[in-house]
Image (cartoon, rainbow, N blue to C red):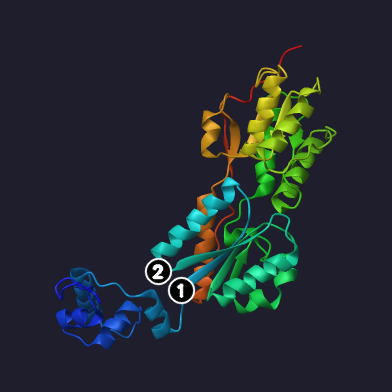
Amino acid sequence: MSTRSPQERAPKQVDVARLAGVSTQTVSRVMLGHRNVRPETAERVLAAVEATGYRLHAAAASLASGRTRMIGVILVSTARYSASATLLGIESVAAETGYAVTTASVAQHAAPAAFLDAFVRLEGQGAEGIVILAPVGFLAETLGSHAERTPTVGHRLESGAGAHGLIDQRAVARTATEHLLDLGHRTVWHVSGDEYWQESRARREEWEAVLRERGIEPPPVIPGDWSPESGYRAGRTIAAIPDCTAVFVSSDEMAFGVIRALHEAGRAVPGDVSVVSVDDIALAAYASPALTTVRQPFEQVGRATATRVIDLIEQRTPVPSAVLVPELIVRGSTAEPPRA
């Protein structure tokens, strides 16, 4: 039995109604956002809510309105900074608009069925709309009618990249590669990300295209998997290539490994080899040397994605957003090539 006194008990809807001089039904309508309440009445109710400290119980609101106001997010299990930063943007918009966020994870290199299972699981939890943070190429075919009945936003589910706040991954690779070539390097080597990811393939293809545009035959791709360990292995390979003076690495985490391996092999960065990477995570500015990188506005992507899925849930026409442009952050890991 509760020992809280009547004066200490949590405020209830009836307390708000009494203070505002309205019925409890009117309080409920105001709290649930119904529009058939006069503005002056709604203001009075909201003032009473503030004065009493009343909070609407989420489960009760769901039962009363028939809605959960929940967004589901499907994530690939990874330690990558991009996923957490994008999720932060989604959660920010959700909090600002009265939505909750629930997540479901799938394993690295998961088969299409795993995404479908996660989607159905989120639907079962009451998600009114779903965001998929996985730029892989099979999602539209895999989800089929599920994505039609539940508002869904994902990198590979809609035509027109700008409609859902994508970062132009080809621009990412072009910016990085052209930066090194413009410094005077004769060619640029590339440490790729995991080929499971569409963004990795897009960057590799654009790196090749930029080199060919300048009459340069692309050197062999050095594979990575986003991890610092794979970057370290790639760096050992690069250190054994005497005429390699510039490398475009597909993530900051891998670039840290590349720089470590080059340092151990006695090759200076950027004195012998210039390194440019992608993401601009917090540690990039504090590496030794500080990392030149292509910044991706992940939180902005999350905010744009959440706004879009909420517009779809609320049956509003989504406002197309511009393709998000990556920004080159020049620091100490790139320079002109060493003189012969």
Residue 78 image position (x, y, % from top left): 63, 51
Tell me, for residue 121, which label it has, or none: none
Quadrant hosting residue 31: bottom left
Residue farthest along the front direction in this orientation:
1
Mark 1 sits on what residue? 69
Residue 240 image position (x, y, % from top left): 80, 23
Q: Amino acid at mark 2?
A: Gly
Tell me, for residue 98, which label it has, or none: 2
Q: State the separation of the CA atoms marked 2 and 1.
A: 7 Å
Residue 83 image position (x, y, % from top left): 58, 52
Task: Residue at 45%, 67% (x, y): give it.
Answer: 100
Give the crowd class for mark 1: few <14, some 14-19, many >=20 residues within 10 Å: many
Looking at the rendered image, the quarter that the C terminus falls into is: top right
- At mark 1, the secondary structure is loop
Q: Nearer the viewer, residue 307 or 50?
A: 50
Q: Amino acid at mark 1?
A: Arg
Disc 2, disc 1: CB below 8 Å?
Answer: yes
Can residue 130 be seen from the camera position used here? yes
Q: Nearer the viewer, residue 71 or 243?
A: 71
Can residue 325 be seen from the camera position used here? no
Task: Residue at 57%, 30% (x, y): give it.
Answer: 330
